[in-house]
Amino acid sequence: MIKKYIKNFKSIIYFLFFVTISISIYSAQKIDISDVQDTMNFVGGDGKIFKKYQGEFINKAGVNGNIEKWSTFKNALDSDQKKGIAGEVAAKFFFEKKGYEILEDHYIERVSILNSESEDENDIFSDKECTTKKGPDNGIDGLFILKNESIQHHSKIIINEAKFRSNQVNLLENDFGFVTGQIQQSHSNWNRPRFSSVACLSDLDYDKENIFRTATLLGRDGTLNLYYITDK
C-alpha cells in the first residue's frame, strides 16, 4: 500500500513538473523576425572590400595588416568579439547610408560642446556617457537617430541588433537566445531596461517613444541583410 502511494505521488510530481515546464515555454516572451527588408553589399566582384569601408572594418575589429580581400578579413576574425564588432560596423555603415547616425558617434562629435560651460549650450545633455554598451551580450548593439535630429528632439529611434555569421546567409529566430529567464534577446521587455540605463536616455519613456526594432546580419559573402523585429 505504501509503495503504491509513493509510486502515485512520484507520478503526480512528474506530471506537475512537465506541466510547469510546458507553461513556462508557452509563456516565453518571443520575437518574430521578418523576411529580408533591405540589403547592402560591402564586397566587389573582385572579392575586395570596397575602399570606403575597408579602413573602419579593419581598425575597429582590431585586425592586423593591410587587408583588401573579404575572405582574408573574414578569416582574420578569430574571436566572437571581433566578429561582433564587424557586424556592428556594417550596421553603422548601412544606417548612415539611410540618413541615420549611431548615438555614440552623435555624442563623440559633440564632446567640445558637451564640455562647454556656456549657458547657450544648456539644451544639450551634459552627461557624455551616452552609450548603449553595457558589456558582452548585455547591451544594445546600435541605437540610431536621424542625422539632423538630436536625442532631445527626435522623431524616431532605431534599436538594432547586429549579427555576423561566417556560415549563414539568412537570420533565424533561434539566432536570438533567451538571455533573461524566458525573455528572448531583442524582445521589447529585454530592450526596455537597457534603454533606460543609458545616461542620456534616462528621461525618455521607452513605451512612449516611436521605436523601430531591427536586426542586421553580415553574412559570409560580405552582404548585410536587414530585418524587422516584433514581439510575438
Image: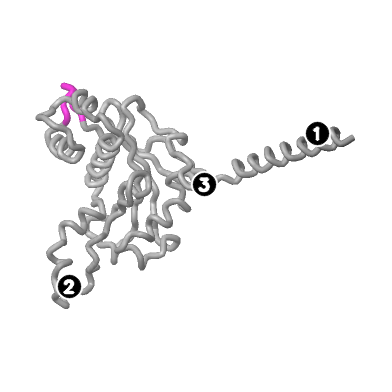
Q: Which residue is mark 2?
A: 121
Give the Cα distance between marks 1 and 2: 75 Å
Give the Cα distance between marks 1 and 3: 32 Å
Instruction: Answer whether residue 47 is magenta in the image.
Output: yes
Secondary structure under tag 1 reads helix
Q: Which mark is residue 181?
A: 3
**Residue 36: quarter of image:** top left
Image coordinates for residue 121, horizontal then vertical, percent: 17, 72
Q: Quadrant of the N terminus?
A: top right
Secondary structure under tag 2 reads helix
**Residue 107: quarter of image:** bottom left
Left/right placement of residue 172 relative to residue 9 reads left
Image coordinates for residue 94, horizontal then vertical, percent: 25, 42
Counting residues from the N terminus, which is met first, the one under dot 1 or under dot 2? 1
The magenta-colored residue range is 43-49
Question: What residue do we see at 76% from left, 36% from top?
Answer: 10
Dot 3 surroundings within 10 Å: few (below 14), some, or many (20 or more)? Answer: few
Q: Which residue is mark 1?
A: 7
Question: What residue do we see at 45% from left, 51% from top?
Answer: 190
Magenta part, dominant SS? loop
